[in-house]
Amino acid sequence: MALRDHPFFRELLSLRLPVEDYVVAGSAPMLAHGLNREIGDIDVVARGAAWKTALEMGHATKSPLGPAQCVALFGGNIEVLDGWFDYSVDSLIGEGEVIEGIRFLSLSRTVEWKSSLGRAVDLEDIFLIRGFLNGVSSS
């Protein structure tokens, strides 16, 4: 299935966020590379016009993911954040890669933040991403 056919990504694209002002983080970059079958939501790190659009559509609350503000949209399917842990939003967006018109956090950064959390749930993801980055098949 193309990313644009996934219900969460259809919702994201309906927001018409400027691609230069956001990056999709969380586990969704794995889905974009075919490494993850399902995701529970989309975490969007935004600045500028993209963050302004999110604020116009919902109320910002404290994010459970570090010192950021979060706007939950589409019943929580999409969470737009003005920060991502201790990373610079500008650098995350600048390092991102555009796939099917959507900017995604790099897989190397995805491994980095998943490793920093030390959660058991992230260990398989880290293994899959490292294998992909090293050219090892996950099948």
Image: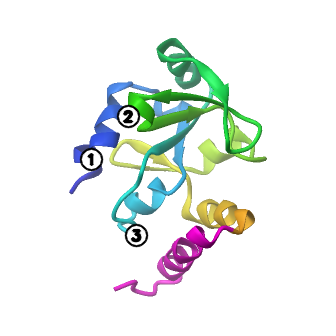
Specify how the rendered protein is coloured. rainbow
Label 2, label 1: how many angstroms apart (C-alpha)? 10 Å
The residues bearing labels 1 and 3 have C-alpha atoms spaced at a distance of: 15 Å
- Residue 66: horizontal and vertical position, in percent? 74, 43
Q: Is mark 2 on a helix, strand or loop?
A: helix
Q: Are marks 3 and 2 in contact (CB under 8 Å)?
A: no
Kind of element beneath mark 1: loop
Give the residue pinned by disc 2: 12
Q: Position of residue 11 (x, y in %)?
A: 33, 33
Give the magenta range.
Answer: 119-139
Question: Which residue: 65% across, 25% down?
Answer: 61
Question: Mark 2 Cα within 10 Å, few/some/many (few <14, many 20+)?
Answer: many
Badge 3 amino acid: Leu
Tell which circle, 3 or 2, labels the residue nearer the N-terminal end. 2
Q: Is residue 12 magenta?
A: no
Q: For the point 62% across and 22% down, which residue is it?
A: 60
The residue closer to the viewer here, 118 or 111, is 118
Q: In which quarter of the image is residue 39?
A: bottom left
Q: Name the residue under label 1.
A: 6
